[in-house]
Image: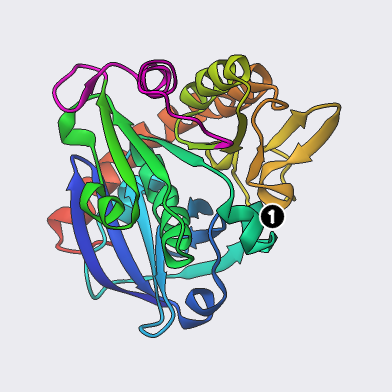
Amino acid sequence: MYKIVKKRDLAPNIFEMDILAPRVANSAQPGQFVIVIADEEGERIPLTICDYDKEEGTVSIVVQAMGCSTKKMAAYNEGDYFKDFVGPLGQPSEYVNEDIEEVKKKKVLFVAGGVGAAPVYPQVRWFHENGIDVDVIVGAKTKDLIILEDKIKNVAGNLYIATDDGSYGFNGMVTGLIEDLVKNQGKKYDLVISIGPMIMMKFVCLLTKKLGIKTIVSLNPIMVDGTGMCGACRVSVGNETKFACVDGPEFDGHLVDFDEALKRQTQYKSEENILNEKREGHVCRCQQQGGAK
């Protein structure tokens, strides 16, 4: 059992939780993820690690309450326990194992969409701790959905905000802001690391390919089992079939077949809708009885 030691509201239906998991915290590296199972009947939910504190033995995750299982997780509070919290899983970001002096020579731009700001934060923090300033774009549909702004601002060289509706920061999508930075402000980047919704990453990659900037993406959104056993996260990268959970979750975005990945991401949507309808009454009764589980 893994205790929730802290829970914070970040935005409507988006929560950050600190989980007491010393072994995971001690081994975690940027880019990796965990599998969370809420209770005996819970699904395996892969979530990218948002933060980790080796001294406190805690790992932070961000949960967006959308499907049946994440809504169940979001109902848990400080002092409650998750049944399982397994990790760190997946491969760490490639720069972690590169020569640090070579990494310092690169101009890096992170592009986070929505809850993608969560897995971007530990990566930006890693650069900061190694004395490297990076630029960061955080985008969302509206100001209310921008998360972790202050945390990222504390470790980024420059932080840029974009909202689709223009309610905060740059008026438009993250791709428009990338173009503005490169074409109008004269920014030069050697590497873009983009994490967020699949459709956002697709269009970021289409743009950066035109601009000639290497781009890494995280394919965590298509994971299901998280161990390579179910095969749901198969994706074509170049001429090879990869599994997002064991070979990734990060890949060269210019080689990813995003159209295939987007189709795969929707394959369980009808089942999820049916499950939500079946469990909605059960969840309500549990909450009326005063229990989260």
- Give residue 234's quadrant in the image: top right
Going by the numbered disc 1, the residue's amino acid type is: Thr
Residue 198 on the magenta span = no
Residue 275, percent from left and from top = 43, 36
Left or right: residue 62 versus residue 192 is: left
Please say which color scheme the image uses: rainbow
From the image, which quarter does the C terminus lie in?
A: bottom left
Q: In this view, does 141 lie to the left or right of 100?
A: left
**At 32% from the left edge and 43% from the top edge, which residue is drawn?**
158
Residue 276, x across and y down, in percent: 37, 35
Q: Would you say residue 188 sits in the magenta stretch?
A: yes
**Looking at this view, is 110 or 118 the one in front?**
110
Q: Residue at x 38, y 58 (%)?
A: 61
Residue 219, by quadrant, is: top right
Q: In the picture shown, does residue 118 fall above or below 237?
A: below
Q: Which residue is drawn at 36% across and 41% down?
A: 115
Q: Position of residue 207 (x, y in %)?
A: 54, 16
Query: Which residue corresponds to mark 1?
Result: 227
Residue 251 position, x and y percent, is 67, 39
Query: Visible in this render: residue 42?
Result: no
Tell me which segment is drawn in magenta.
164-191
Q: Dot 1: what SS?
A: loop
